[in-house]
Image: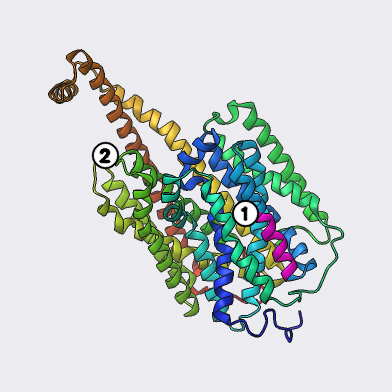
Amino acid sequence: MDNTIPIFKSWVPEWMIKIVLFILLLPSIVLFFLPITNIQAAAGYYGSEPADMQFSVALFYAGYVGFYSLERRFFNFLAAREYFILFTFLLMLTSWICYHTHEVYIFFPIRFIQGLLFASTVNLSLSLMFTRLKSERAREISFSVFFGLLICALPFNNIVTADLIDNFNYNIVYKGALFSYLPSLIFLPLTMNRIRLNIRFPLYKLDWQSFAIYSIGLALIGYILIFGQEYYWFGDPRIRYSMLGLIGLTALFIIRQRAMKRPYIDLRIFRSRSFKAGLLILFIMYICRFVSGITNGYFTGLLGFDPMHVSYINAFNLFGLISGTIIAACLIIQKKNVRLIWSIGFILLLIFHLIMFYHSDVQADEYKYFIPLYIQGFGVGIIMVPTIIYTISSVAVSRGTSAAAISLAIRYLGFCSSIALINYFELFGKSKHYNAFQDHLSVLDYPVVHHMQTQANILLSKGLHAGLSTKATDKLLISTLNKQDQLRFAMDYYELIAWLIVGILLLISLSPYLGKTIIRLRSRRLSPA
């Protein structure tokens, strides 16, 4: 690109460009995790199961991950302004379809297409920012800002959409997203010059075969991990055939990449020990991050908070994410070693899980969870940005795109794996605790008899007919039992993740080369995932 030609017209102030780029990214980030911000409302609107809404997020993620490497060809072929108009118009079209459709099987492919377009949005927006940043410090701050936005998507969506979904139909959110693209669609074409950010490469020899294999494999990973426990894993032919297809596609993809002169993803990046270490940390962090699903389920299922109340409580988690990202950026700029950064983040996450394990109860006040939610957000925020920069910068600059693509795939795998773990503990763990509680519940146990008699007397004092009090007492006992099951499975999950964090902390402390390793963003042309 000819740096003498400005991207934006001379009369456009710098602060206005940053605001417009932020407005451009925001609707797409909101659409990312939208179906699981209020999963019951989304499932009810489409007449489906909650797992279907989780899979719709996985499809968005799979489209983003799979298209990331191929998207760069389109990015280099089209001028920035025309490219921006094209994908923004397509995003508005997909939002319009989501607004009008009630069929989940129409919704699924549209979500995948939105993931493809999200990759275009991210690449263009960050490229516009990176080409204007000359110093390494400015680039690291921009990295932190973008990934801070990304990890804040879920709690931010809860806050923004809770009131809308509660007072209007669920699809009102897509209508809002449709109109939110208009400001940037009007402003950027008027202010951008007709230039290219890179040398134009014709759209011939597009490796669409690798894209198709890679994307289908990613979708199969999401399907297996999200629906596996519900279908009893390999006892169901759908999971068996999906797994066989995934193995075949993985083998075909690896063989194809090794044989190609210009591979879709350069597998030589896995020769770097630091790259593999970064992927492991990133995977564990993403499993810890999505423990928020358990926490929100605890707030709604046991404490009885409505979705709006839960969204307001999660504001503390949002503040923690923002604070952690800011501190992480400061630590990177100060060239602190990566062992210190990772240790601080995982210790905070360990504290959060221990607090939730020992302070979970069927009755509690919400203010007891303000500080733990802040700690969890702070820990995730302080780990994520340094880990991504560390992972991408640990390979040669020429392989940075492949490293970014694989780090993005690992984050997708962490997201799907966290759902699989939660589903396992919820479906299998709750049934295990339910059977264990039943072994101790009988008419011969005095505490049970005393509890049921107390509940019956309360119901009679409230005016319930004597003939119905016994049935009502039985239902109350079952309800209490279900709450205890949910509480126990949540505690089991917190305990598992706590032990996982202890293991990763030991691994970090025992790795000698991490003691002097610092994080440095080496390339100005680096495009983050």
* Mark positioned earlier in the residue sequence (1 or 2): 2
Q: For the C terminus, which image quadrant? A: bottom right
**Residue 394, visible in the rendered structure:** no
**Residue at 61% of width from left, 36% of height from top?**
103
**Image check: 396 left or right of 318?**
right
10 Å neighbourhood of mark 2: few (<14), some, or many (≥20)?
A: some
Determine which residue is flagged by label 1.
409
Tell me the kind of residue under disc 1: Ala
The quadrant in which the N terminus is found is: bottom right
Residue 265 inside the magenta-drawn segment = no
Q: Position of residue 190 (x, y in %)?
A: 68, 74
Query: Residue 247 appears at what percent x and percent y?
Result: 70, 40
User: For the point 57% across and 47% down, which residue is it?
Assistant: 57
Q: Which of the 4 image quarters holds residue 493?
A: top left
* Residue topped by disc 2: 362
Name the dominant secondary structure of the magenta segment. Answer: helix
Q: Is residue 235 above or below residue 43?
A: above
Q: Position of residue 429 (x, y in %)?
A: 41, 33
Q: Are the two marked residues, 1 and 2, in contact with CB atoms closer than 8 angstroms?
A: no
Question: As rendered, which of 421 and 467 lies closer to the eye?
Answer: 467
Q: Nearer the viewer, mark 1 or mark 2?
A: 2
Amino acid found under the numbered disc labelled 2: Val
Residue 352 found in image quarter: bottom left
In this picture, which residue range is highlighted in magenta?
81-92
Magenta stretch containing residue 85, yes or no? Answer: yes
